[in-house]
Image: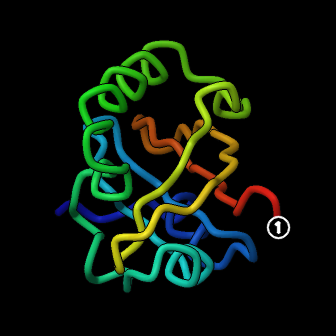
Amino acid sequence: MTEVPAAVAAFEQATDAVVVVDVQGVIVVFNEGAEELFGYSASDVTGEFVEVLVPDGMQWGHQAYRRGYFAEPNDREMDPGLDPHAATADGSLVPISVRLEPVRTDGKLFVAAHVSRRGG
């Protein structure tokens, strides 16, 4: 895996749960808040495709949404009408809200997903 630019690595210090992916959808930052929410350690998922956090049967659809987002990145909430859930390390599903934030640095594009549990 390539070195993570400082502007991206800074998300490790965020107080909310943040997962940062590159344009291929590979997780490059998985902060402490994300570890608590998803039940994975950063070392378990860094370098994996973000779809590891997507419930079974929904990964292909998520890949299409991800490619569409990177084609026209903007700071926005992930569509709540999709009723998003995340798959945790123990296999349970957690209802989530996600704010997507494009991060452009060193000539590269990343997306920081700020994730929170819905309804709590």
What secondary structure is found at the residue carrying circle 1? loop
The C terminus sits in image quarter: bottom right
Pointer 1 residue: 120
Image location of residue 119, percent across then percent down: 81, 59
User: Is residue 110 shown above or below 16?
Assistant: above
Q: Residue at x 60, y 67 (%)?
A: 11
Image location of residue 41, percent across then percent down: 37, 86
Image location of residue 58, percent across then percent down: 32, 36
Q: Is residue 58 left or right of residue 20?
A: left
The N terminus sits in image quarter: bottom left
Q: Is residue 99 left or right of residue 38?
A: right
Report crowding for label 1: few under 14, some 14 to 19, many 20 or more residues within 10 A (C-alpha): few
Q: Is residue 100 left or right of residue 38?
A: right
Mark 1 belongs to which amino acid? Gly
Q: Is residue 114 left or right of residue 84?
A: right
Q: Residue at x 57, y 42 (%)?
A: 84
Disc tally is 1
**Residue 14 or 7: which is nearer the viewer?**
14
Q: Residue at x 59, y 28 (%)?
A: 82
- The image quadrant that residue 89 belongs to is bottom left
